[in-house]
Image: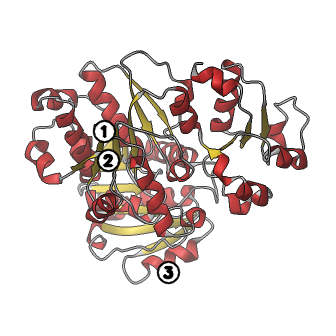
Amino acid sequence: MTLSKALRKKRFAIYGLGITGISVVNYFRKLKIKEFYVWDDSKEKRRHFKEKINIKLFSKKLNIVDYIILSPGINIKKTKLKKPLLKNKHKIITDLDLFYMQNPDVRSIVITGTNGKSTTCKIVEHLLKKNRFHTQLGGNIGKSILNSNKRKRTLFIIEASSFQLAHSKFIKPNYAFILNVSKDHLDWHGSMRKYIQSKLKIFSLQEKNDFAFLKDRKLINMFNKNKNLSKLQSVSSKSYKKIKDKIHNKYLKSKANEENMSFVYKLSKILKIKNKAFLKSFRKFNGLPHRHEIFFRKRKIRFINDSKATSFESSRFALQSNSNILWIVGGLPKLGDKFYLRNLKKNIIKSYIVGKHTKFFARQIKGKIDFLVSKNLRFAVKKIFTEIKNIGLDKEITILLSPASASYDQYKNFEERGNEFKRLVKLYGKNFF
């Protein structure tokens, strides 16, 4: 019996009909799995499905299904289905689990961490393609891994969020990265300990011929304590720095990407990619939008869209990698986030606080750096162009949108926020330069 036939005999419930949930529905239809039930708290999303089901009926179905596919980000403790979900928690899996259930012998690289996941995935994909590996990229980066096309020697690159790993039961990578861990999503996980434990699950099913990549000493100690079977690869920036100056790519040579590149360089040694090939691969590489994206330069002034920075730790990389910064910050703050600006304030000329939670950010930076409460991006950008006039056009200046917070107080997502920033800069920049 093939695994797909085994899956056809199982019963499923899908909770959440966003990008992930829809990809699971389409996947089930492709596999001809007939018995699955769907639910989303949004009436608008439920309208796309003909199945006549209400929340009470769906709640009962949770007790009889074999697996519950929960969309990433759904907090069990904050949903109306809390009781039946907690009762059936042992059944909860993710779309990544489905992928491994259907493809138990797949070769994969799984990358997680608080910051830099998407960028590192793209760097790895770029390196491997340049060196004639057949790759597929998916997961939390925005493309469902269930939509990928598998070949015999495909090496899958998967970005995994802490939400996915927390419920993971079948994820089994050949190469697993935890780039870093800092306070994030604590309102979802409940504590820093649980957040870290979710990340460490990336190694739990690895075997003795698999590889675990870690840099943080605390995580290395926890890995050893857990007695994981995989081969630990201790990542060091020192090894990468020996060849860093030979990379002819300003984006990748930035401090913000040093950690990401250290992991990728370590992987290249395991995959037996020579230094010459490694360096040649990165002559042309453009970073992802909204991640330290230098989208506009004029004279000595540059504008950086770092809208993806949704915590202070994320913004720290951009703040330490630039100087003479006019910093736009603000949005929906993360629980427990604190701003440590002692070693960074020398890089910042002034801060512009936007969003609906300006008091939170004012408390964080008051007495440390000069700031102006700007309420929204439009007002902030207009004020910044006035500030540039006062400073003068002959001095190097960085205008940085790195909000250190989520976007949901004023925008649908970080992409919309970043695109609005770029639009406003180009709008006001036309008459300025």
Query: Which of the marked residues, 2 or 3, is nearer the chain's N terminus?
Result: 2
Instruction: Locate residue 144 relative to residue 70 in the image: left or right.
Output: left
Crowd around label 3: few <14 · some 14–19 · many ≥20 (10 Å): few
Q: Which residue is mark 1?
A: 210
Amino acid identity at mark 1: Asp
Query: Which of the marked residues, 2 or 1, is nearer the chain's N terminus?
Result: 1
| Residue at horizontal 25 percent and vertical 49 percent from the top | 232
Compared to residue 152, the image places residue 101 above or below, namely: below
Where disc 2 sits, the SS reads loop
Amino acid identity at mark 2: Leu
Query: Residue 219 — which label?
Result: none
Compared to residue 406, the image places residue 361 above or below, namely: below
- Residue extending furthest toward the front: 1
Q: Nearer the viewer, mark 2 or mark 1?
A: 2
Compared to residue 317, the image places residue 1 above or below, namely: above
| Residue at horizontal 45 percent and vertical 66 percent from the top | 183
- Residue extending furthest toward the bottom: 367
Q: Which residue is mark 2?
A: 229
Instruction: Locate residue 209 relative to residue 306 in the image: left or right.
Output: left
Amino acid identity at mark 3: Arg
Q: Which residue is mark 3?
A: 363
**Residue 118: percent from left, percent from top:** 41, 42
Q: Label 3, label 1: how many angstroms apart (C-alpha)? A: 46 Å
